[in-house]
Amino acid sequence: MEFTSRQLRAFHFVAQHQSFARAAEKLFMTPSGVSVLIRELERQLGFRLFDRTTRQVELTAYGSNLLAVTQPSLSALDAAMSSIEQAAKGRTRSISVGTTPWLAANVLPPAIREFREHRPDLRIRLFDGNLSTVARRVAAGKLELGLGLFERMPGVRRAPFFRFSLMVIRPDKNAAFNRVSTRWTALNGQTLISLTSNYPHQQLIDKQLEKSGVVWNRRQTVNLLDTQIGLVEADEGIAIIPSFGLPACRNRKVTMSELVDPIVTLEFYEISHRGRKLPEEAKEFSAFLKRYIARWAGEAGIL
């Protein structure tokens, strides 16, 4: 007869707190997920572990016996794992972060360089891929953190990370267009360079253009934000991009202004494995990255 450590931990947390909800919090699961683990364990054992009512959860006699037998083994396993983890951290400490190729190339590297000045002992391992690949790797436990415009998905914890806005960029040749903000309706009749519709923010842009009644000419559709910005610089048209594109615009001959009436924002999320506690080092880097982005975005007036 084989049991998983996850089943036994669920059993111990329910016994300790006399609550499936509290046990779920400790395991970063839903109460129904904990119930499934307990039912599976009871089915394998052939007896009930808990007497459940609407108000309380109590161990059965068999459950008490199992708790007494398994508690020392789990405690010994936890102590051994902690010892190994501390030994490994003593040699090298690292966390893995996944995001899209553009952010991995333009935003994360300078942030990592600055972070390393404060934490030279912590290595940031960067993975670049599309959103679905990053999300799958987080769900599989291959990445501690993912950053991007993620939808909800099973097995993944999603938390708001930063809020960006939509901007319009134009070739830097006409002082009349060097303004802090631009109304959506002012884009009427303009020639736009767009990204392909598989980008979540491009879908949002297309919806807002239609909602604002803007009639535009779509000259080109490209796959990369860098290409989009380069074509604007070459005076092939204008483009609507998220404000996180600012770093790529700094060294280009383009002007950038916020789109208003309405201001349209994009919620950037941080995702992590729902069933695992986020390492303290990952929390530290995440907090630093928020401050880092807020600083350059605030200085540019594009929060």
Image: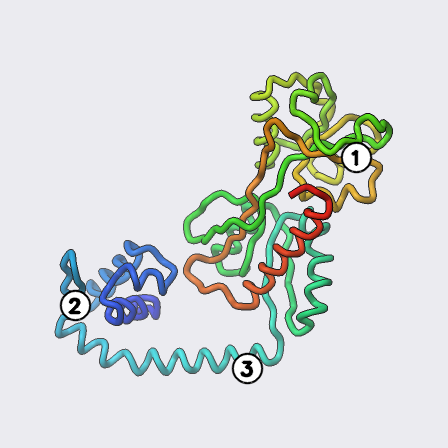
Q: Position of residue 147 (x, y in %)?
A: 58, 51
Dot 1 crowding, Cα within 10 Å, few <14, some 14–19, many 20+: many
Q: Could you tell me which secondary element the residue under label 3 belongs to?
A: helix
> Quick one: label 3, few (<14), some, or many (20+) residues within 10 Å?
few
Q: What colouring does the structure picture have?
A: rainbow
Q: CA distance from mark 3 to mark 2?
A: 39 Å
Q: Nearer the viewer, residue 25 or 6?
A: 25
Amino acid at pointer 1: Thr
Label 3 to label 1, Cα distance in Å? 52 Å
Looking at the image, residue 123 lies above or below residue 190: below
The residue singled out by tag 3 in the image is 87
Q: Secondary structure at mark 2?
A: strand
Answer with left or right where residue 223 lies relative to residue 59: right
**Going from the N terminus, do you reach mark 3 or mark 1 first?**
3
Judged by depth in the image, the label closer to the viewer, 2 or 1, is: 1
For badge 3, the amino acid type reads Ala
Q: What residue sits right under mark 1 in the picture?
A: 255
What residue is at 34 percent from the left and 78 percent from the top? 74
| Horizontal and vertical percent position of residue 110 | 73, 57
Upstream in sequence: badge 2 or badge 1: 2
Q: Earlier in the sequence, mark 3 or mark 2?
A: 2
Image quadrant in which the N terminus is located: bottom left
Tag 1 secondary structure: strand
Which amino acid, by three-letter code, is at mark 2? Answer: Glu
Q: Are marks 2 and 1 in contact (CB under 8 Å)?
A: no
Question: Which mark is nearer the camera, 3 or 2?
Answer: 2
